[in-house]
Amino acid sequence: MSRLAATTLVLTIPLPLTQHPAAVYLDGLADGSRPTMRQALDAIAQLLTNNQCDAMTLNWAALRYQNTAAIRTALMKRYAPATANKMLCALRRVLREALRLDLMDATDYAKAVDFPSIPVKKGLRGRALSQDEIAALFKVCMDDPAATGARDAALIAILRGAGLRRAEAVNLDLKDFNASSSKLEVRDGKGGKDRTVYLPNVAIALVEDWLVVRGLSPGPLLCPIRKGGRVELRRMTPQAVLLIVQKRATEAGVAAFSPHDFRRTFCSDLLDAGTDIVTVQKLAGHASPVTTAKYDRRGEETKRKAVERLEIPYTRRR
C-alpha cells in the first residue's frame, strides 16, 4: 500500500469512544475476547498504514473495497486460515459499526465487506480425551501433596465436568459455585452471555477439597499459588490454565492436548450418552447446534453402533 494511501486512512481528529467504530465493537465483546480482537484490529491497522496506525487511530470509515481486498490477501499470506478469518470477521464487525454510527455510506459499506472468507482445508481440530487419560491427569494432581495439587484437580474437574472455556473457568467466583445444587453460574461467557451449568458429584467433591485449601473468603474460585503454598485471592489468567494443563499432561504421560479439548470431550461424551444436541448446546454455551456438532469427536465406532441399533423387519430366506 502506498504511503499516500496510508496517510489518508489516519484519523486527523480523535473520535469520542462512543463514536469510534472499533471502540464500540470492542466494548461489546466479552472480557476474554477483547484483548485478542484488539490485537487483530491493531495488526490490520498497521498493515493498512505501514505501521502508522493502531486500531484507535485508523479511520475505519475511510476503508473501501480496495483496502479490504488487500487486507484479505495480506492476512491469507501471513496467518493460518482460521486466524485470518477471525481477523476478517473483526474487520467486518468494525465496518458495520461505522455504518451504524453514520460514519460510512451504505453503498461503500456493502462494497467494503464484499470479500470472501479464506477457505479452510484441513481436518477437525483437537481431539477427545479417553477415560484413561483423564484418570491419569487426576492421579498426578491427587499425588501432588502441595496446594497446587488440589487446585489443579479442581480446575480439571471443572473443565472436564462442565466443559467451560478457559476464560470462563478463571472468571468463576466462589459465589458462582453451589455444591448443594451442583450448579456453576457462568457469567459473561462468550458473546457476553450468562448460563447455568452443572457439575457431576466427583467434580463437586474435588472443588470442595480445593476450598479446604483456598478458604471461603469471597473472590475468584480458582487462584494462583505462590511458592510456599500461599493462596493469592486474585484471578488467574487463561494462559495460566494452558500452562497448568500442559504441565499435568507431561507428568501424566498423556499425549499433547489443549484445554479446549476438554470441551470437545464434554460434548462428545454427552452426545454419546444420548443427550439431545440442543441440551448439549445450551450447556456448552454455543450459539447454534451446528457449532456443537463440530465438537463431536466420537469417531467411526459410534456411527457403526448407531446403525446397529436400526431395526429392519426382514426374515432371511431359508
Image (tube, rainbow, N blue to C red):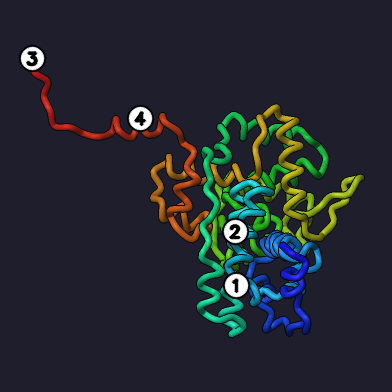
Please tell me whether mark 1 sits on a helix, a strand or a loop.
Answer: helix
**Dot 1 corresponds to which residue?**
95
Dot 3, how many residues are within 10 Å of its Cα: few (below 14), some (14-19), or many (20+)? few
The quarter in which the C terminus is drawn is top left
- Is residue 309 placed above or below 264 in the rendered structure? above
Residue at 65%, 44% in the rendered image:
259
Mark linked to residue 304: 4
The residue furthest left is 318
**Dot 2 corresponds to which residue?**
184
Q: Sequence order check: which comes first, mark 3 or mark 2?
A: 2
Q: Position of residue 314 (x, y in %)?
A: 12, 28
The amino acid sitting under disc 1 is Leu
The amino acid sitting under disc 2 is Leu
Please tell me whether mark 3 sits on a helix, a strand or a loop.
Answer: loop
Of residues 231 and 212, the one nearer the viewer is 231
Residue at 60%, 65% in the rendered image:
66
Residue at 57%, 49% in the rendered image:
163
Dot 2, how many residues are within 10 Å of its Cα: few (below 14), some (14-19), or many (20+)? many
The amino acid sitting under disc 3 is Arg
Q: Nearer the viewer, mark 2 or mark 1?
A: 1
Q: Sequence order check: which comes first, mark 4 or mark 1?
A: 1
Q: CA distance from mark 3 to mark 2?
A: 59 Å
The amino acid sitting under disc 4 is Arg
Q: CA distance from mark 4 to mark 3?
A: 27 Å
Q: Position of residue 23 (x, y in %)?
A: 69, 75
Residue at 54%, 57% in the rendered image:
197
Q: Sequence order check: which comes first, mark 4 or mark 2?
A: 2
**Circle 2/circle 1 CB separation < 8 Å:** no
**Dot 3 corresponds to which residue?**
318
The quarter in which the N terminus is drawn is bottom right
**Circle 3/circle 2 CB separation < 8 Å:** no
